[in-house]
Amino acid sequence: MNSQTKTNKRILALDILRGVTIAGMIMVNNPGTWGHIYAPLRHAEWNGLTPTDLVFPFFMFIMGISTYISLKKYNFEFSHAAVLKILKRTIIIFLIGLAIGWFSRFCYYWAGSHEDLSFGEQLWASVWTFDRIRILGVMQRLALCYGATAVIALTMKHRHIPYLIATLLVGYFILLMCGNGFAYNETNILSIVDRAILTPAHMYKDNGIDPEGLLSTIPSIAHVLLGFCVGRMMLDSNKTENRETLLNSHLIKLFLIGTILTFAGFLLSYGCPINKKIWSPTFVLTTCGLASSFLALLIWIIDVKGYKKWCTFFEAFGVNPLFMYVLGGVLSILFGSISFPWGDGSISIHGFLYKIVLMPIFGETGGSLAYALLFVAINWCIGYQLYKRKIYIKI
């Protein structure tokens, strides 16, 4: 009886939103060529917002909701088992992020031409890249924000968390204003801190700005905490209510929250620009608001109206989200680094699919988009086999 009730009250839209964001992250990270990207798949160069800029923050928002769901079984009590689980998951996700960075450097260096090196020297040079490996990144940010959110959820009264979110965002805004934080160069306080602590060799190269840097982790934690609060507001409902009443309650709350946050983010952007690379406070508000509204829309389409046939594609990504993201990263590295003879030289799998197969048909930009879609489809085929066999790989 309890199992059946739990199944009936499960909200499929949560899995679908996870799946949409993971599929989106894989697609925008794998164009046929970075020189010809389909316009909506480009990140904003600095200030501003594009559809691509919504993908990562949407996933972080849904991660906040998922954190609420996962910690609820511990009754949000600080315990040895809960802390051990949080610490273990945080470390594993962080190390996976580092491992992907190392694997990329290993594969591309090994695939390069090094005729002046012996086999042993080339192998060692490919393996030992720790002096220039990027320390932070997408997976590392997810790890740090999950760990911080989970610990806060276990140690702080939940009614006080909104005040903490406001403190983090306001404090970060003051830091940006006092530290030239909206400058797209190395005078930015974010760049200064990252170069001092991480050193340039271990940073992303973008005018001295690391989009997943140390200081910008502060608003990112607030971002996930916002998702946690939305999850609490949405799911901490009267358990005696029937499913239809619960769903209608979810819709009203999510649309209300989404409207308020989105409006506040755009309104405040006149004084604090929306900027993904520094994860500005208005970027947090706007993207969390849009994510909340989008989740409400998905709940209405899927769980209220029952239009579920189209969901299978995204559900295959959503049930194993982090595994699918890692899989996409690994396949991208392999496609780009594994070459085979072609004509008078050699060509990578990536190069062959884009330049030889797709570009002659769709052109440079169309072929770039077609490659991204093909790459997502390849990942989906693997994810669907896991989904069909009910294999869930927890990371």
Image (tube, grey):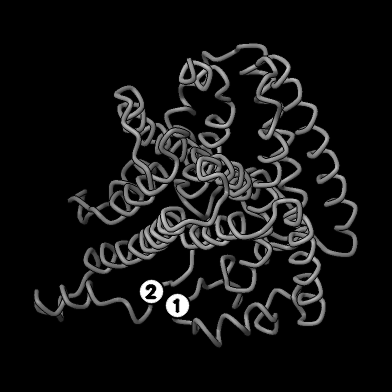
Q: Residue at x 52, y 13 (%)?
A: 309
Query: Residue 266 location, x and y as percent?
Result: 85, 51
Q: Quadrant of residue 212?
A: bottom right
Local packing at callout 2 (Cα closer than 10 Å; few below 14, some 14-19, many 20+) is some
- Residue lying furthest bottom: 196
Question: Residue 133 has which mark?
Answer: 2
Q: Quadrant of residue 132?
A: bottom left
Viewer-closest of 330 and 7: 7
Q: Quadrant of residue 108?
A: bottom left
Query: Residue 303 location, x and y as percent?
Result: 62, 18
The amino acid type, in three-letter code, at marker 1 is His
Question: Residue 202 has which mark?
Answer: 1
Q: Residue at x 71, y 46 (%)?
A: 288
Query: Residue 377 location, x and y as percent?
Result: 40, 31
Q: Is residue 110 left or right of residue 361?
A: left
Q: Is residue 65 above or below residue 43?
A: above
Mark closest to the chain's N terminus, 2 or 1: 2
Asked whether the beta carbons under mark 2 and mark 1 sit within 8 Å of each other, the answer is: yes
Q: CA distance from mark 2 to mark 1?
A: 5 Å
Tell me the SS state at disc 2: loop
Q: Is residue 214 above or below residue 324?
A: below
Q: Residue at x 56, y 41 (%)?
A: 72
